Image (tube, grey):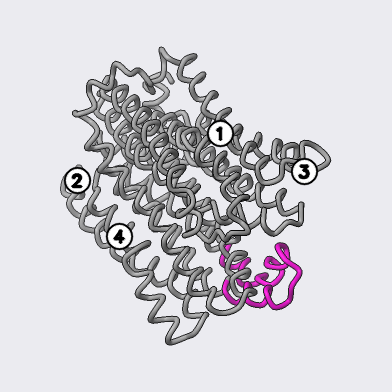
């Protein structure tokens, strides 16, 4: 991307216009990702084979862990790259992007090999039974073992490309992969075509991520004289100089995704002690609450480069204004979701199942858990801003408070005080605590920066 255009977006373009220019493509790609995350379940569900449908649920936790690995280098690398550009250190930006790419690829390959070696205990821990294990393993071979490194590189490269201001190209690459997955699923899954079932869904997911990575590699090659994103192995000689910063900044995002897997599994375990309909109701709620979650992630990812760039160039006032406007957008959408979910909870649950008892549980659960959405919509941007500023300690504390430290103790306490329904109160409480702590950190940082701003 041309340097003057990058400077225009990050430095001189009106703040609201610049923020929208970055976050709209990021939100769009997240919405496509949300749809294609549900595509495998939808098309495999059309086979009316519970074992194959259960296989996708069992493997989902391992698939989320791929995102955690990707964020370690993707979010960390993107933040460091944007900061380098803000300091006019173009060569450093190239080195950071190359180190992030190869670090992500190596980690992805190691993760896939480790999963293959420990597939049986991992899938069993995630809920695979003797009946569902063969289907779960066959699906996991394609989405985790074969496709895992490409899934990681897809998200990682999108973050790096977005970090230099090319949000539209980043969104197109991710969205293209998502649309391709949606198109390939029925061809590979359904009996009237190839009829491969859950294995076909895994192949479709793997191929779509391969296609997205090929797009990004072609983009880097074609734009090599304009982009700072590099995959040159010769730049790895600078690894010692940058790797600590990349990992330090990326670790909170990676940990948050990893702890999310643990928290969801723990909540499901508690609910499973009640009725099957309650477990199904929780599963429906987890699908519905992905909409505001993915929207907030899109806003946060879109803002990251601008926040990091302006922080590094000491334009704190512009960074604060961009952050405030992004938070308004994220919060507004979450409040709209709260209103719709509270008013139409039974109708929304009925979109997923035709069972009155399950719909009842789902509606009750949704109306409780939806309270967390406004706090979540501000919590994600707050954590991303800390990462953009290189404030790893603050980002880490806010992340583990949101997922990991409080969840399981609260599950024991609230389930005792309010059986079953108390489990649904955990997320609103931890999101509120995390946001309060993050806001306190931000206030202290802002007060420090205020003394550096020119007085008017």
Task: Locate the N terminus by quadrant.
Answer: top left
Numbered label attached to residue 87: none
Tag nearer the camera, 1 or 2? 1
108 or 178, which lies in front? 108
Q: Residue furthest front?
A: 130
Q: Tell me, yes or no, whether the two marked residues, 4 and 1, touch with CB atoms within 8 Å.
A: no
| Mark found first going from the N terminus, 4 or 2 | 4
- Judge whether 450 appears above or below 366 on screen: above
Label 3: state its secondary structure. Answer: loop
Query: Residue at label 1?
Result: 209
Query: Residue at label 4?
Result: 438
Calculate the distance from the C-alpha at mark 3 to the C-alpha at mark 2. Answer: 66 Å
| Mark found first going from the N terminus, 3 or 4 | 3
* Identity of the residue drawn at 22% across and 45% down: 456
Numbered label attached to residue 190: 3
Overall secondary structure of the magenta stretch? Answer: helix
Q: Is residue 316 left or right of residue 282?
A: left
Percent coordinates x, y for residue 409 in the rendering? 35, 74
Tag nearer the camera, 4 or 1? 1
- Judge whether 68 appears above or below 188 on screen: below
Calculate the distance from the C-alpha at mark 4 to the C-alpha at mark 1. Answer: 34 Å
Tag nearer the camera, 3 or 4? 3
Disc 2 crowd rating (10 Å Cα; few below 14, some 14-19, many 20+) is few
The magenta region covers: 336-365
- The stretch drawn in magenta includes residue 350: yes
Numbered label attached to residue 455: 2
Q: Residue furthest bottom?
A: 417
Percent coordinates x, y for residue 122 in the rendering? 46, 53
| Mark found first going from the N terminus, 1 or 2 | 1
* Identity of the residue drawn at 76% across and 41% down: 195
Percent coordinates x, y for residue 215 in the rendering? 54, 24
- The stretch drawn in magenta includes residue 173: no
């Amino acid at each position: 991307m041309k340097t003057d255009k990058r400077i225009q977006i990050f430095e001189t373009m009106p703040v609201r216009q610049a923020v929208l220019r970055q976050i709209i493509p990021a939100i769009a790609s997240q919405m496509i990702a949300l749809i294609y995350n549900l595509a495998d379940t939808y098309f495999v569900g059309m086979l009316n084979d519970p074992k194959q449908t259960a296989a996708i649920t069992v493997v989902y936790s391992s698939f989320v862990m791929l995102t955690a690995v990707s964020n370690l280098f993707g979010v960390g690398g993107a933040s460091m790259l944007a900061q380098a550009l803000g300091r006019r250190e173009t060569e450093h930006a190239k080195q950071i992007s190359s180190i992030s790419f190869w670090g992500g690829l190596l980690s992805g390959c190691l993760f896939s090999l480790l999963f293959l070696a420990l597939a049986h205990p991992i899938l069993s821990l995630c809920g695979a039974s003797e009946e569902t294990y063969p289907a779960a393993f066959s699906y996991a071979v394609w989405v985790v073992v074969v496709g895992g490194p490409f899934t990681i590189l897809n998200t990682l490269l999108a973050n790096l490309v977005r970090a230099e201001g090319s949000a539209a190209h980043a969104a197109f690459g991710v969205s293209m992969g998502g649309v391709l997955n949606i198109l390939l699923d029925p061809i590979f899954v359904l009996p009237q075509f190839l009829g491969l079932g859950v294995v076909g869904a895994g192949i479709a997911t793997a191929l779509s991520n391969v296609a997205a990575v090929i797009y990004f590699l072609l983009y880097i090659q074609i734009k090599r004289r304009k982009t700072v994103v590099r995959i040159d192995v010769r730049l790895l000689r600078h690894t010692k100089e940058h790797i600590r910063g990349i990992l330090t900044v990326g670790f909170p995002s990676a940990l948050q995704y990893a702890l999310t897997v643990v928290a969801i599994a723990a909540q499901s375990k508690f609910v499973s002690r009640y009725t099957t309909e309650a477990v199904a109701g929780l599963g429906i709620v987890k699908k519905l609450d992905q909409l505001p979650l993915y929207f907030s992630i899109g806003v946060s990812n879109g803002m990251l480069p601008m926040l990091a760039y302006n922080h590094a160039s000491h334009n704190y006032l512009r960074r604060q204004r961009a952050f405030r406007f992004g938070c308004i957008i994220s919060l507004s959408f979450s409040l709209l979701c709260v209103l719709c979910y509270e008013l139409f909870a039974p109708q929304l649950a009925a979109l997923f199942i035709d069972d009155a008892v399950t719909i009842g549980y789902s509606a009750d659960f949704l109306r409780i858990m939806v309270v967390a959405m406004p706090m979540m919509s501000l919590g994600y941007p707050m954590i991303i801003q800390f990462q953009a500023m290189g404030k790893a300690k603050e980002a880490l504390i806010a992340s583990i408070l949101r997922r990991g430290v409080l969840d399981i103790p609260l599950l024991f306490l609230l389930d005792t005080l309010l059986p079953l329904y108390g489990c649904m109160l955990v997320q609103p409480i931890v999101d509120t605590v995390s946001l309060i702590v993050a806001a306190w950190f931000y206030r202290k940082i802002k007060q420090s920066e205020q003394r550096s701003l020119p007085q008017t």
